[in-house]
C-alpha cells in the first residue's frame, strides 16, 4: 500500500477518488506491487527459511572443523585458525543459501 515502494499507487489513488480506479491502471498497479513489493519480501522469507534449515548442517560443519582443529592443536578463534576459518566460510555461505556441499 506504500507509494514509496510502489509509486504508481499515488496515481491510482488520484484517479480512483475513493472508488475502484481505472481497470488498466489497476492492473498495472497490481503487477507493480507484485514486482516491487511482494516478490522481494517473499524472496527474503524463503532465504530466511533456507538459512534456518541449514543451521543444523552449519553447526555440524563447525563442530567437525573444531574437532579436527583441536586434534591438530589449532585454536579456531585465534590467529592460527584464520586459514581454517577462511576455508570454512564459503561452504557455510553455500549452506545458508540452500546449496549442497561436499
Image: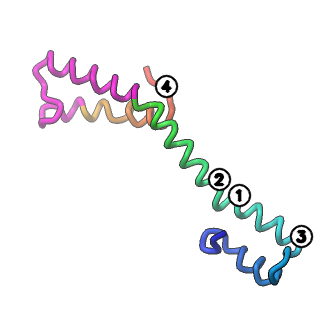
Rendered location of residue 39, percent (x, y): 65, 53
Dot in front, 1 or 4: 1
Q: Secondary structure at mark 1?
A: helix
Task: Give the side of residue 21 with respect to residue 53, left or right.
Answer: right
Q: Quadrant of residue 34?
A: bottom right
Q: Is residue 69 magenta?
A: yes
Between 37 and 86, the one nearer to me in the picture: 37
Label 1 to label 2, Cα distance in Å?
6 Å
Dot in front, 4 or 3: 3
Between 48 and 79, the one nearer to me in the picture: 48
Label 4 to label 3, Cα distance in Å?
46 Å
Label 2 to label 3, Cα distance in Å?
22 Å
Q: Secondary structure at mark 4?
A: loop
Q: Secondary structure at mark 2?
A: helix
User: Which callout, 1 or 4, points at the residue further toward the start of the chain?
Assistant: 1
User: Which callout, 1 or 3, points at the residue further toward the start of the chain?
Assistant: 3
Q: Which residue is mark 3?
A: 23
Instruction: Give the residue at x 65% y 56%.
Output: 38
Main SS category, magenta section: helix
Q: Is residue 63 magenta?
A: yes
Label 1 to label 4, Cα distance in Å?
30 Å
User: Which callout, 4 or 3, points at the residue further toward the start of the chain?
Assistant: 3
Between 17 and 94, the one nearer to me in the picture: 17
Q: Which residue is mark 1?
A: 34
Rendered location of residue 63, percent (x, y): 27, 23
Marks 4,2: beta carbons within 8 A: no
> Is 23 situated above or below 67?
below
Label 4 to label 2, Cα distance in Å?
24 Å
Q: Which residue is mark 2?
A: 39
Amino acid at each position: 500500500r506504500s507509494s514509496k515502494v510502489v509509486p504508481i499507487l499515488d496515481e491510482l489513488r488520484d484517479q480512483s477518488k475513493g472508488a475502484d480506479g481505472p481497470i488498466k491502471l489497476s492492473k498495472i498497479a497490481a503487477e507493480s506491487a507484485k514486482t516491487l513489493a511482494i516478490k522481494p519480501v517473499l524472496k527474503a522469507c524463503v532465504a530466511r527459511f533456507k538459512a534456518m534449515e541449514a543451521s543444523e548442517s552449519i553447526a555440524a560443519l563447525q563442530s567437525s572443523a573444531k574437532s579436527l582443529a583441536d586434534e591438530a592443536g589449532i585454536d579456531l578463534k585465534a590467529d592460527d585458525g584464520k586459514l581454517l576459518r577462511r576455508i570454512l566460510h564459503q561452504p557455510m555461505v553455500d549452506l545458508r543459501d540452500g546449496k549442497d556441499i561436499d
